[in-house]
Image (cartoon, rainbow, N blue to C red):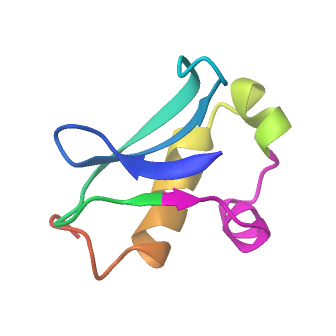
């Protein structure tokens, strides 16, 4: 699981398969001033407050990921 910015600098969380195909993606409404490509840590998951295996069924996961991203990347964000 990784934090990354897409081609428009939108901050996302995703999982990519070995084939390079994306199998999971959560977009935040946050834009970064710079490119981000960082592995997610245990601390990041604790800050989100939900385990990755539960995310497909967590109706509030987008809000949780966005809240964690605001805290983790506040210096790099354009719109927060």
Depth check: 9 or 80 in front? 9
Locate residue 77: give its quadrant.
bottom left
Depth check: 72 or 60 in front? 72
Q: In the rendered view, does 8 fall on the left or right side of 76?
A: left
Residue extending furthest front? 19
Percent position of residue 29, x then y: 29, 46
Image point 71% across, 66% down: which residue? Answer: 41
Quadrant of the snapshot with the C terminus: bottom left
User: Relative to residue 43, is residue 32 depicted above or below?
Assistant: above
Percent position of residue 38, x then y: 52, 61
Quadrant of the snapshot with the N terminus: top right
Image point 76% across, 25% down: which residue? Answer: 57
User: Relative to residue 75, is residue 78 depicted above or below?
Assistant: above
Image point 55% across, 37% down: which residue? Answer: 14
Question: Magenta residues?
Answer: 38-51
Locate residue 44: give its quadrant.
bottom right
Residue 40 in magenta stretch: yes
């Amino acid at each position: 699981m990784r934090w990354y910015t897409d081609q428009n600098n939108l901050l996302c969380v995703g999982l990519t398969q070995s084939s390079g195909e994306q199998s999971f993606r959560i977009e935040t409404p946050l834009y970064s001033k710079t490119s981000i490509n960082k592995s997610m840590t245990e601390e990041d998951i604790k800050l989100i407050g939900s385990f990755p295996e539960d995310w497909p069924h967590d109706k509030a996961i987008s809000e949780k990921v966005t809240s964690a991203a605001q805290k983790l990347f506040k210096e790099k964000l354009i719109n927060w």
